[in-house]
Amino acid sequence: MSLVEQSHAAGGHVGKPLRRKEDPRLITGRATYVDDITLPGMLHAVVVRSPEAHARIVSIDTSAAEARDDVVAVFTGADMTDLASPLPCAWAPEGVEVKQVEHWPLARDAVKHVGDPVAVVVCEDRGAAFDAAEDVFVEYEPLPAVTDARAALADGSPLVHESLGTNQSHEWSLGGGDLEAGFAAADVIIERTVENHRISGAPIEPRGLVADYRAGHLTIHTSTQVPHFVRLFLGLMLGMSEERVRVIAPEVGGGFGAKLQMTGEEALFSWVSRKLQRPVKWIETRSEHMAVCHHGRAQTADIRMGATNDGRITAFHVKITQDLGAYLMLLTPTIPSLGAFVMNGVYDMPAVQTDIVGAYTNTCATDAIRGAGRPEATHMIEVCMDQLAAELGMDRLELRRKNFIPKENFPAETAVGIVYDSGDYAGALDKLLEHVDVAEVEASKAALREQGILRGIGFSTYTEICGLAPSRITGPAGFGLQAGLWESAIVRVTVTGAVTVYTGTSPHGQGHETTMAQVVADQLGVDPENVEIIHGDTGTGAMGLGTYGSRSTAVGTESISRAAEKVAKKVREIVAHTLEASAEDIVVQDGKFVVKGSPDKGMALAEVAGMAHVRPELLPEGMEPALEETSFYDPQNFVFPFGAHACIVDVEEETGKVRVVRHIAVDDCGPAINPMLIDGQVHGGIAHAIGQALYEQVAYDEDGQLVTGTFVDYALPTAAELPSFETDRTETPSPVNTLGVKGVGEAGTIAATPAVLNAVVDALRPVGVTYLQMPLFPERIWRAMNDAKGGAA
Ligand code: MCN
């Protein structure tokens, strides 16, 4: 039995829907975000950015800005030539040539996309910095731009980086099984192009930082998901030894992958602070965020799926063109490859192949946004499953069931050589259907049609790969980020029995302070209220690798649990020694370490801690004083959450407008530590996916101008656009970690877009529309209906 199941069974804190410990400070305005930080002598900075998508910088005249009384300094790329290294791209797979240029925090000779930084203005106050930035005059010689990845790969396209001689950065493939034989064995082959358009992470708090270099040490407060990465790369870029760099992620108002980055601004303003020997604050504006904080998705895939007439998939081949934007950021080329690991989805496919081509365009870089590669893969697979079912004249769910990897096959090795840890896909679908009466939905269609409403239902049965990551896999695959993707933790018990836990993960909305405390509380027989979780500061506590890839529970909490178990073991030995019992007989019961079968005979953690600190001479011979343990955990495998989603939509026939009527989600992330937080994660994830499917798109015009630079043009859904989500769970423990847990932070986003798209297509089939691309804007749907009707309207 996994540790979480044992805690459930023992009636512990784990498994209970505890309210989040962090919320009181967050909802009463007591939390400290970057912009709340003010340091003595602090300066304010604004970045001057390119209005051109592609241009040579002819000259930059900073004299007018510098002449202003309130300006402390103006810097351009020409001033900043003493960095030890450019911005990093941490992907270096063996045997793959990745063509790239040096990418510096300030452009040197040319700008490659709208928003590329060309200068920085530093003032005593922020308003003055905005005004002074207007006085920096940059002369540009515009160059031809390309904004479409496929066009960028065509002969004769303008080149984003002339020196590379091509817009293609790299090619990468992952496959397994005999594709040719698979297609030869197919009775039916469908071919589709699937677009997964560009989106923004759009966290509620844009990026921001306060960099403070003094006396040879740099401290930077930055709104990041990955403080330890930032420390490593700042050290390398600034030529500083890492122990002199301290990175603090204070309260972070959401990240969604957008803050999984080593940003140019972090290096730029650390450098400025060192140059001026004063603290510098930079806070990103919303429109700046939309233009220059990395985007996600931006993939087009050509897909072939082969199957026999009775619905057995024989081969699946995906050719992805990834729009990289103008530069390779930390993980840019990695993202589509993440999807390739799970390209067979929940299905037993004998042959699967993913071929990826990366293309530079004159747009903002793409990188990880919630799900990072797996939403794209799931979208392709699940949209194609519906298309295939229609082609075969088969029920969509029957086709899925026919191809599910059966429960008894786990651990299951897929055609590409990945081993799925555990799963029960039919079980998740069965549970979903307890909540959705498909026949009833079908029966409701006719009456609604008479009112001009086309109703549709769509499904998605999915798995994802998370818990980044086992270094034995990520190292050779080039995902190593110059470090393995293990996680570490320190569990410290003070003299009074209070527990402080240091984690290397860096939450920004996921509620780790609550769920991690629940786990430790059960292991040490204390109240979660008395377990403090410290995170997000490279200057205190555990080493770590941050929060992304739904890794914090399966890797981070597992690491904490291992450190807590070491503490618990020591406590059991002390109690056994003191009570003259055997350590094997000591168990945690009702807040005490007691002798099994004699609940009155025991010691509370506080008593043991007191003894371990104050009277170490009473401890067993040779035992070290105090109670503190560390763990470093490198998982043996990824974990593979899964589930089944259904979406019911109504489409207005007159306008093409879509309303999501119900979205029902059954997700399996192993046994729940906190079911309420899991629901919260799934809700947010689905909102993200519905946003992408129906409302959100980052768009550039042909000249490379961003046309969705604000929330007026980039339509994030609000509660008014969304139904109340209906969630349920199955719990299939993972054998990979002792807790049995899998990730859930991205599950909703990964699962939901195909359910929405399949629902809209289902709604439109009666009017002759059989296939569509996201985003499902009313105009696109209206046009599709109109075309299907012969363009008569
Ligand atoms: N959980 C649980 N029981 C389980 C599994 C998970 O109670 N069996 C809980 C965890 O304890 C944790 C939460 O679910 O509180 C999410 O855990 P996990 O799936 O491990 O994901 P991470 O904590 O690593 O979070 C990362 C993930 C990612 S990759 C993105 S992007 C994302 C997301 O989380 N960005 C978010 N959720 C977000 N939520 C908010 N509010 N803001 C973001 O920016």
Image (cartoon, rainbow, N blue to C red):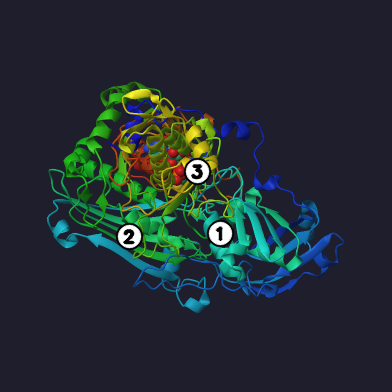
- Which dot marks residue 473? 2
The correct choice, above or below, for 593 with respect to 374 in the image is above
Q: Locate residue 696, reporting x and y percent.
A: 50, 44
| Nearest the eye: 138 or 94 | 94
User: Tag 1, which secondary structure?
Assistant: helix
**Among numbered discs 3 and 2, the one appearing first in the sequence:** 2
- Does label 1 or label 2 sit earlier along the sequence? 1
Query: Looking at the image, is mark 1 or mark 3 earlier in the sequence?
Result: 1
Please give left or right for residue 162 compared with residue 553 in the image: right
Image quadrant in which the C terminus is located: top left
**Tag 3: residue type?**
Pro
Question: Which residue is identified by label 1?
Answer: 230
View quadrant of ligand 1: top left
Residue at horizontal 62 percent and vertical 63 percent from the top:
244
Mark on residue 468?
none
Q: Choose top left, top right, bottom left or bottom right for residue 587.
A: top left
Read off the residue under disc 3.
616
Residue 371 image position (x, y, % from top left): 42, 48
Position in image of residue 287 (x %, y %):
63, 50
Along the line of sight, the residue nearer the viewer: 550 or 637? 637
Callout 3 environment at 10 Å: few (<14), some (14 to 19), or many (20+)?
A: some
Q: Residues within 10 Å of mark 2 (few under 14, many from 20)?
A: some
Task: Check if mark 1's residue and mark 3's residue have beta carbons within 8 Å.
Answer: no
What amino acid does circle 1 point to? Val
Q: Secondary structure at mark 2?
A: helix
**Gap in angstroms between the C-alphas marked 1 and 3:** 40 Å
In this rendered view, identify the residue nearer to me: 79 or 216.
216
Among the 4 quarters of the image, the one containing residue 567: top left
Q: Residue at x 85, y 66 (%)?
A: 67
> Marks 1 and 2, how far apart in space?
23 Å
